[in-house]
Image (cartoon, rainbow, N blue to C red):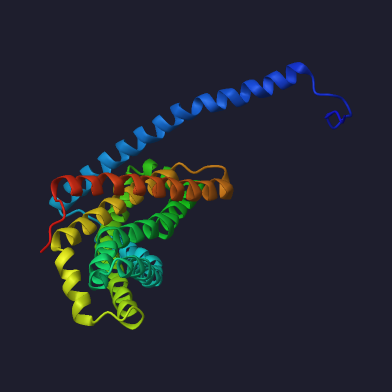
Amino acid sequence: MTVTTSRHGQRPSKSATLSRLADAGERVTQIPTRSAGTTGRGVALAANVIRYAIVDALTLRLPIGEFLQQAWLLLKVTATPALLMAIPFGAMVSVVTSGLVTQVGASSLIGASSGVGVVRQGAPITAGLLMGGAAASAIASDFGARAIREELDALRALGIDPVRRLVVPRFLALIAIAPMLCTVILVSGTAAAYVLAVTVSDVTPGSFWDSFGLFANITDVWFAMIKTVVFAAIVAIISSLRGMEANRGAQGVADAVNSSVVLNVVCIVIANLVITQLQVMFFPSEIA
């Protein structure tokens, strides 16, 4: 039997093994504390951002130039991927649902199933994941680089709040472009589902749109927009927080980007579940 030894050819001492186990146990027990601390800082940051946004909007002190610059930057990094994701997603929904409804002899409902799938879940989730990936990476890396270069500390030394000067414009910019992304995905995804249903499943155009309008209504569109705006707010807060807390040089920036993307995806899925449940409870589906 092979015995594991240290690099000096000796077995690690019992005290060293116990010490490593104790350190590992301590790190595990600190996870809830660190998670609670991160949540608390995120809530505090969100409260400050909302307060500054309202006050600056009422007093006409919003940095419009920074807002427009960030909105254009975030739109550039998310618009094309949104279009590229929406088309195959709409096609996938059409293929899956057409097979199911055709088996039960309800091929005329392909438009309804495709529309409900894209409008209620596909468009907001796709937009949220894109913002949680591309937009979150851009925001977290920007703040991380500023933190490593001590630009944030320099702003504080000059009496300028980085939250007010940098976070608020990005927060508002992402919220502003969120409905645009949702609209692009909704239109292109529905169009892809329509084309596939008509060309592959032999559904007549009139039948597709009749069933689509029968089950998908304006309430679904509004909830899709609300979801996307909520996802944008979550992404902006989490990405800014993780970026501003970056340290340890380039590795710290990479860790901040990675953690922001992971946290954003988890929070977006949870928020989508909560909002969907509220929609089902208070605005149940009705046939138009």
The x and y percentages for residue 270 are: 34, 44
Q: Please state, as top left, top right, bottom left or bottom right, where the N terminus lies in the image.
A: top right
Q: Is residue 10 left or right of residue 236?
A: right
Q: Is residue 52 above or below residue 181?
A: above
Q: Residue at x 17, y 45 (%)?
A: 281
Q: Is residue 122 left or right of residue 138?
A: left
Q: Nearer the viewer, residue 233 or 87?
A: 87
Q: Residue at x 20, y 70 (%)?
A: 212
The x and y percentages for residue 240 are: 38, 48
Quarter of the view holding residue 64: bottom left
The x and y percentages for residue 53 are: 22, 49
Furthest residue in direction left, as rendered: 288
Q: Please state, as top left, top right, bottom left or bottom right, where the C terminus lies in the image.
A: bottom left
Q: Is residue 258 left or right of residue 177?
A: right
Q: Nearer the viewer, residue 207 or 19?
A: 207
Query: Is any atom of residue 188 visible in this view?
Result: yes
Count of all numbered marks drawn on residues in the image: 0
Q: Residue at x 43, y 32 (%)?
A: 35
Query: Is any atom of residue 162 visible in this view?
Result: no
Q: Is residue 22 above or below residue 94?
A: above
The x and y percentages for residue 33 are: 44, 26
Quarter of the view holding residue 197: bottom left
Quarter of the view holding residue 10: top right
